[in-house]
């Protein structure tokens, strides 16, 4: 049977009473409350048990990589915000980083610290949405609003920092757009003082709730080998017990000067790499981000926040591949310059795209309700998949 | 009601009976059921708002109190869409079946010692029978919508309600055995006003039966953590996906009103119903106080506790829901049933009195500990995060 371009195999079988039964084909999405943006799954189910879930992507494709070839080096930064609007700072950072590597620009120290502060705030920002919407998908609405409340304070901080609450456009090639506003550091440390106890409160509210743990523990485990085979990155990879973090293993910016741990999944409630591990790794990463932010506050030096970069930037011909640890993992930017004012080619490699490829494998023979938990735990963000 | 008709009309025929019955029904539905269901939506949204650190409805009326009327009017004015592929007559009929199953229970709810529409001698049996109609309506809605999500919701609902009726029924039996009657008024009359004379503390088995009945009633009322039939994040809106306007509202009115029905049945069976310690000369004062007692008990247990649970707990999965019913609740309910019988036959009087007192004291201690914990957390929050607290009836929030 063909369903909107997908060949879905419908199996007919006779049960003992001689009644012919047929699998049900469900189209979940693109308008479905739990698909986080416009994402679609074609599900072949036997009652509540799924036999197959095929992801269908492309609903949010905006040719962002092609746009890069038309708008020039500086002009592409606002577009990078839209690559992953839940964690836009990392995309800003990735593009600026790649251009600096190509053009050989030295970024001032203070600008690097500003970038790390913005990145780590953005990581908290993104993980809050992830764990909040995960709780909501499992059926608990209150944790989501608590997460959104904290996100609101972060939005205010970002607004003061760069004028935008979602699509930041904060970083520039060679540094950052603006220095930290006066008194902003105090507000940041005030936020951290407030936020860290609230993470504990969040743990009490939902993380170790019996029903929540029962719903997630042991569901859809991904072994370390599978995670590497399917090219999972970021929290999804670390939940499977692989201690790999670009910030530690291939350090960039000022991360070598900062001290932090990389939390990994230990299977404390079920199997290593199950949905609960993917959830709890994100909770712990938020605490680590707080730790990094506190160090940045004390260590940030004075100085300029942007290097001298020609307005009509023409990086020498060549190509570069940079990687950085975004909220959804190892984000790669491959940029080719042909020595003109416009990039020759840009390719973005994102975490959600590889994460969605494992959904058909791990969702086999789960309940439909579990698919929701799997999607939420992989932290799929539709614009990042399609770009 | 027969006495009423005969006192009003000299020669009462079946026409008189019919007219009075319809009038009485209309008064009950429009004067009691709709406001209870409607105001409960406002209460739920305000409490939910406060739990979620936001305000909730605050525009219509004082503190948003008239929001439920505005919602009702809006829904009545909306277009009533019937999908082309749906089974029209069934689709239109389903909400009424659900509504009948819910409103029908009000016929035997004992609001005071006199205010009861019909004190049937099979009262509690009638309640279980009539509430079972709800599942027919939901299954009808799920099937007639011609939508796979609706169908899944309908099937989940059928499985859930049919399964949980067994532990619910089995935990009514101990009370029926203790009372020796199925009539709602008889059950209440055999309890007293004081907590130690309630059925809840009659024996350990009745105590357990209370919790089993409460959990099963939550499941039958499709409330979190058992809200699988309309699980928003899984099944879009479950059986109500294709419904719009007033028909959609009827489903949700039944759900919210059902909370009060759950509370009323629990109050009747376990919490002493309308019993008050004093009798008054004035019949009016007596009945008003009885009504207030019954209403407060029913509203506290049936509405406020489920609201609190709903906005705290996540949802369980279908297989967990079934295994909880068949592997835990049903066996425990059977043990309860046999235990109550054995207790009634073999336990000496002194043991009964001692058990009653021990149960009352431990329940009081648990309540005190809970209250202490709540007060502690409130004080702690005031000390550390005053900016997150605000007056529950406030309609705006001071900048924090």
Image (tube, coloured by chain):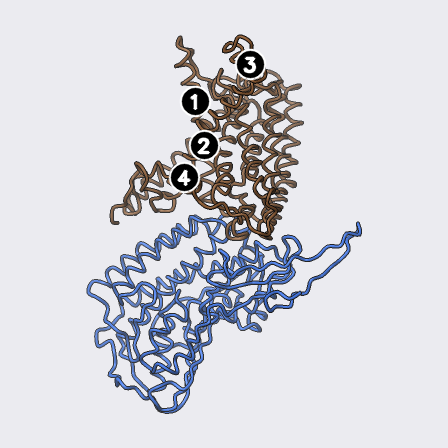
> Where is residue B49 drawn, in percent x and y?
37, 44
Please state the chain letter of the residue tagged with numbered disc 4 in the rendered image.
Answer: B
Q: Nearer the viewer, mark 3 or mark 1?
A: 3
Helix, strand, or loop for circle 2? Answer: helix
Residue appearing at x 21%, y 66% in the figure: A181
Question: Is disc 4 on the same chain as disc 1?
Answer: yes
Please give the residue where the numbered disc 4 appears in the rendered image. B73
User: Marks 1 and 3: in contact by CB < 8 Å?
Assistant: no
In 3D space, how far apart are the residues under numbered discs 1 and 2 (Cα atoms)? 20 Å
Chain painted blue = A
Helix, strand, or loop for circle 3? Answer: helix
Please give the residue where the numbered disc 2 appears in the rendered image. B34
Q: Nearer the viewer, residue B365 or A230?
A: A230
Please give the residue where the numbered disc 3 appears in the rendered image. B2
Q: Quadrant of residue B91?
A: top right
Q: Quadrant of residue A192?
A: bottom left
Chain painted brown = B
Please give the residue where the numbered disc 1 appears in the rendered image. B293
Which residue of the protein is positioned furthest toward the left in this rendering? A182
């Amino acid at each position: 049977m063909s369903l909107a371009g997908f060949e879905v195999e419908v199996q007919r079988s006779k049960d003992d009473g001689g009644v012919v039964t047929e699998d049900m084909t469900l189209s979940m999405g693109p308008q479905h409350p739990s698909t986080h943006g416009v994402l679609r799954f074609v599900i072949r189910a036997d009652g509540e048990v799924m036999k197959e879930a095929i992801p269908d992507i492309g609903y949010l494709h905006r040719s962002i990589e092609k746009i890069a070839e038309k708008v020039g080096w500086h002009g592409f930064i606002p577009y990078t915000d839209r690559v992953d609007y839940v964690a836009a700072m990392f995309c800003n950072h990735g593009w600026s980083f790649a251009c600096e590597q190509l053009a050989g620009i030295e970024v001032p120290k203070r600008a690097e610290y500003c970038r790390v502060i913005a990145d780590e705030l953005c990581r908290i920002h993104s993980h809050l949405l992830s764990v909040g919407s995960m709780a909501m998908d499992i059926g608990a609405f209150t944790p989501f609003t608590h997460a959104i409340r904290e996100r609101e304070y972060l939005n205010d901080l970002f607004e003061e920092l760069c004028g935008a609450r979602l699509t930041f456009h904060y970083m520039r090639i060679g540094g950052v757009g603006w220095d930290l506003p006066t008194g902003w550091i105090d507000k940041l440390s005030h936020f951290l003082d407030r936020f860290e106890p609230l993470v504990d409160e969040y743990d009490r509210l939902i993380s170790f709730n019996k029903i929540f743990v029962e719903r997630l523990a042991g569901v859809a485990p991904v072994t370390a080998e599978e995670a590497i085979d399917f090219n999972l990155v970021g929290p999804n990879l670390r939940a499977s017990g692989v201690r790999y973090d670009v910030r530690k293993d291939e350090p960039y910016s000022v991360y070598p000067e900062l001290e932090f741990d990389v939390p990994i999944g230990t299977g404390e409630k079920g199997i290593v790499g199950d949905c609960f591990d993917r959830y709890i790794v994100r909770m712990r990463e938020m605490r680590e981000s707080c730790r990094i932010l506190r160090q940045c506050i004390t260590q940030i030096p004075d100085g300029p926040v942007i290097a001298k970069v020609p307005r009509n930037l023409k990086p020498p011909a060549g190509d570069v591949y940079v990687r950085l640890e975004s909220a959804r993992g190892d984000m790669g930017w491959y940029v080719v310059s042909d020595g003109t004012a416009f990039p020759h080619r840009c390719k973005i490699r994102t975490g959600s795209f590889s994460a969605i490829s494992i959904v058909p494998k791990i969702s086999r023979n789960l309940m439909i309700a579990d698919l929701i938990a799997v999607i939420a735990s992989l932290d799929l963000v539709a614009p990042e998949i399609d770009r | 009601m027969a006495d009423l008709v005969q006192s009003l009309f000299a020669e009462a025929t079946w026409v008189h009976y019919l007219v009075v019955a319809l009038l009485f029904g209309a008064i009950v539905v429009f004067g009691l059921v709709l406001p209870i269901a409607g105001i409960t939506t406002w209460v739920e949204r305000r409490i939910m708002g406060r739990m979620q650190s936001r305000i909730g409805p605050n525009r219509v009326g004082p503190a948003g109190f008239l929001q439920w009327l505005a919602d009702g009017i809006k829904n009545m004015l909306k277009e009533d869409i019937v999908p082309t592929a749906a089974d029209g007559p069934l689709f239109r009929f389903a909400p009424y079946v659900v509504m009948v199953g819910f409103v029908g229970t009000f016929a035997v709810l004992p609001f005071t010692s006199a205010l009861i529409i019909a004190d049937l001698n099979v009262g509690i049996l009638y309640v279980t029978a009539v509430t079972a109609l709800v599942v027919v309506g939901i299954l009808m809605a799920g099937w007639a919508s011609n939508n796979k999500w609706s169908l899944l919701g309908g099937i989940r609902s059928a499985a859930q309600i049919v399964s949980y009726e067994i532990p619910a029924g089995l935990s009514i039996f101990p009370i029926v055995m203790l009372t020796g009657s199925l009539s709602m008024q008889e059950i209440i009359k055999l309890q007293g006003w004081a907590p130690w004379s309630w059925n809840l503390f009659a024996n350990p088995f009745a105590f357990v039966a209370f919790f089993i009945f409460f959990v099963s009633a939550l499941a039958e009322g499709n409330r979190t953590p058992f809200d699988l039939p309309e699980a928003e994040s899984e099944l879009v809106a479950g059986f109500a996906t294709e419904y719009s306007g007033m028909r959609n509202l009827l489903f949700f009115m039944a759900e919210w009103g059902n909370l009060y029905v759950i509370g009323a049945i629990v109050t009747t069976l376990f919490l002493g119903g309308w019993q008050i310690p004093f009798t008054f000369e004035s019949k009016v004062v007596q009945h008003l106080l009885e009504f207030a007692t019954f209403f407060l008990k029913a509203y506290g247990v049936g509405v406020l506790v489920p609201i609190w649970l709903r906005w705290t707990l996540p949802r369980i999965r279908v297989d967990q829901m079934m295994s909880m019913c068949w592997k835990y609740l049903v066996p425990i309910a059977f043990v309860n049933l046999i235990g109550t019988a054995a207790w009634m036959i073999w336990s000496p009087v002194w043991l009964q009195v001692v058990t009653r007192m021990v149960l009352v004291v431990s329940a009081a201690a648990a309540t005190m500990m809970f209250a202490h914990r709540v007060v502690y957390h409130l004080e702690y929050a005031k000390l550390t995060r005053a900016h997150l607290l605000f007056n529950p009836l406030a309609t705006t929030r001071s900048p924090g």
